[in-house]
Image: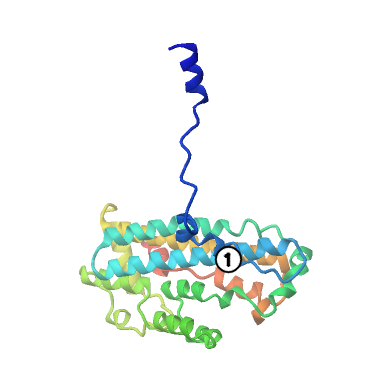
Amino acid sequence: MSHQAHQSHETQEPETPHLDFQGTTPYEDYVKADVLTHLQHTLSDDPGEMVFLVTTQVMELWFTVIVHEWETAACALREDRVPAAIDALKRSVRELEALNASWRPLAQLTPAQFNSYRSALGEGSGFQSAMYRRMEFLLGEKSVSMLVPHRGAPRVHAELEKALHEPCLYDEVLRLLARRGHAIPDAVLTRDVSRRYEPSEQVEAVWADLYRGDQADELARLGEALTDVAELVWRWRNDHLTATRRAMGAKPGTGGSAGVAWLEKRAQKNVFPELWTARSYV
C-alpha cells in the first residue's frame, strides 16, 4: 500500500449515523425519554430529594415489569405451559435483583438527610403504590382494605379490584399440581381468592413429595423458580426495613403507617410458604 493510500485509510471518517429526522427521533418515539425525564418535580430545596424521587419512580417501573412477568407466568400455568412460566419467573428474578438494588442510593440516608425533605411527602407512603399492591396480590397477599386509598382514581381502583378477585400466581401453581394428579385439597382449590392465601399441611406434603423425587422434573424446577422469587421478595422487604430504620428509626411512617413496626411484621412473612416448610421433610 502506498504512503498516500495509507494516510487516506487512516483519516477516513467512520460512517455517520442518520441524524436528520422530520419530527422527534425514533428512540424518543419508542422510549418516551423526554416524558420520563420531566416527571421529576421536587418539593423542597434539598438536593437529596431528587435521588429519593427518581429512585422511587424507578421502583415503580420495575414493579410494572414484574407484574407483567408474573401475569405472563400465571397465564402460562393456566394453559399447562410450564416451561414458559418458568422462563417468565426467571426473568422476574433478574428484575427483582435490579429492583432490590434500587435501595442502594437510599440505604445510607441519615435521619437529618431524610428529614430535610420528608415533609414534602406529606401523607404519601409506599404502601399507597397501586402497582406494588398488584405485586402483593399476585403473591397471594390479598386485602380488600388496600383498595380504599385508590377510590379517587377510578381506573386504578378498577384494575386493583379485578386483580383482587383473580387467582394469584400461587393459586395457578396449585391448580396445575392438582391437574397433574397431586393431592391438593378441594378447600384450597375452591377457596375465596380475594382473601389472603393461608398455608396448608396437605400442600406442604405435596411439595415434600415433589422434592423427594426427580429434581429434573419440571414441577420441581417450577418450585425452585418460585422459591427464587420468594427469596428476593423477602430480601426486598428486609432491605426496605433496613433503609427505613436507618433513615427514621422507630418514628411513625408517612401516610400514618406504623413505620418500622409494620415493616418488621411484613418482613417475617414467607411468600409461597409451603415451599419453605416442606424442606424440613425432604
Toward the viewer: 143 or 118? 118
Classify mark 1: helix, strand or loop: helix
Q: At 66% across and 64% down in the image, what residue appears?
A: 52
Read off the residue under disc 1: 57
Q: At 43% across and 71% down in the image, what residue appears?
A: 139
From the top left corner, tell me how far across and down residue 133 is, in percent: 49, 75
From the top left corner, tell me how far across and down residue 108 is, in percent: 70, 57
How is the protein colored in the picture?
Answer: rainbow
Q: Count the labels in the image.
A: 1
Q: Residues within 10 Å of mark 1 (few under 14, many from 20)?
A: some
Q: At 38% across and 83% down in the image, what residue appears?
A: 165
Asked if residue 56 lies left or right of residue 167, the reply is right
**Quadrant for the C terminus in the image:** bottom left
For the question of whether residue 74 can be seen, the reply is: yes
Report which quarter residue 255 is drawn in: bottom right
From the top left corner, tell me how far across and down residue 62 is, in percent: 50, 63
Toward the viewer: 194 or 265? 194
User: Of the residues shown, which amino acid type is indicated by label 1?
Assistant: Gln
Asked if residue 62 lies left or right of residue 102, the reply is left
**Quadrant for the N terminus in the image:** top left
Against 204, is 187 above or below?
Answer: below
Q: At 50% across and 31% down in the image, what residue appears?
A: 13
Report which quarter residue 179 is drawn in: bottom left
For the question of whether residue 219 can be seen, the reply is: no
Toward the viewer: 235 or 91? 91
